[in-house]
Amino acid sequence: MTAERPTVALVAQRAGVSVASVSRVLNGLPAGAATREKVERAAAELGYRPNVFARSLKVRRSQQLALAVADVGNPVYVEMMRAIEDEARGSGYRLLVSSTGGRSDDTLALLDSLSSGYADGLLLSPVRVDDTLVEALRRVSFPAVVIGTIPRSVPLDNVRANSAGGVRLALEHLHARGRRRIAFLNGPSDTVPGSARRRAFERTARTLGLDPAPELRIEAGDFTLGEGRKAAEILLERTLPDAVLGGNDLLAIATMQVLTERGLRIPDDVAVVGMDDTELAGVTSPALTSVDLGAHERGRTAARLLLARLTDPAREVQRVAVQPTLTVRDSS
């Protein structure tokens, strides 16, 4: 034993390895068997114990999982969170939730903080994926699962929605009911969902022969009620569609509010369809037709993938797509 207070640096010196290697072993991250043995032996000889609930070296876990989403108030993330929490609790983990506000810098800061070991793994649902984030995800050294679309070059487990299939279901439904001037009130196109849904709308609209007038396409500043109302006002000032597809339920509900305030009947004058099929869709008046993109299933699947990754860090990377379904209600 040494008279000095045991530190990570002293453990590294005794083991003959780097401080980074000691940190990886003590935080339960992948490391070579020989390195792990040296670090554990040195830590035991020095009487070092990691300051995580005074756990033994063989546990090396905080029993916490982190979830990062753009907006904790969005009903989609609430549903996802419930599913993840159920899976985490059933495996003895607590869930820590962080809201990034959709900002890349906050997401990057969170990735950096996970290296300190305050959580054993991360579930990340980014709405914006730029080159900087992609590179950071490629370098992630702890167990992580991305809920959303990322390049296949990122070697992380991934669960995504089939937004393109969901848009197709919505438009085919409206087309079958005789709607041809279908407006698309989307969220920001610089986000992953906004971009995917815009491309899918344009492709399916061409296939179905829908009115291509540019005034039928409008982009809200965010996927929120407030921004949706602003966009709906602008849309109705310049044209009157016979149907509106909202980029999510909040945008669709905002559109319904503005239509009603203008004395237009739903669905007689204008049909409305949303995406995500959140709990709100069933309590609006009229009830909102919406595409279920499987938020609960995405959360549950992602949590199970992360728990499996914690058990077996070397397992093959999994990529899962959750398929959409359409729930028809009074609004269409």
Image (cartoon, grey):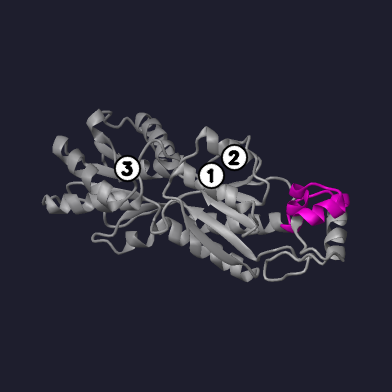
Q: Nearer the viewer, residue 89 or 273?
A: 89
* Residue on which the image places disc 3: 176
Is residue 326 one of those drawn in magenta?
A: no
Earlier-in-chain disc, 1 versus 2: 1
Q: Residue furthest front?
A: 3
Residue 67: numbered disc: none
Is residue 24 one of those drawn in magenta?
A: yes
Report whether residue 61 is seen: yes
Q: Which residues are magenta?
A: 9-35
Secondary structure beneath label 1: helix
Rendered image quadrant of residue 202: top left
Q: Position of residue 133 (x, y in %)?
A: 54, 39
Categorize mark 2 by other alpha carbons within 10 Å: few (<14), some (14-19), many (20+).
Answer: some
* Residue on which the image places disc 1: 108
Rendered image quadrant of residue 140: top right
Q: Residue furthest left?
A: 263
Q: Amino acid at mark 1?
A: Leu
Secondary structure beneath label 2: helix
324 relative to 178 in the view: left or right: right
* Residue on which the image places disc 2: 136
Whether 203 is drawn above or below 236: the answer is: above
Earlier-in-chain disc, 3 versus 1: 1
Mark 3–mark 2 distance (CA, rounded to whole Å): 45 Å
Q: Amino acid at mark 3?
A: Ala
Circles 1, 2 touching at the beta carbon (< 8 Å): yes
Q: Position of residue 124 (x, y in %)?
A: 54, 50
Circles 3, 1 touching at the beta carbon (< 8 Å): no
> From the viewer's perspective, is the residue at label 3 or at label 1 nearer?
1
Name the dominant secondary structure of the magenta segment.
Answer: helix
Q: Position of residue 238 (x, y in %)?
A: 15, 35
Report whether residue 312 is seen: no
Mark 1–mark 2 distance (CA, rounded to whole Å): 7 Å
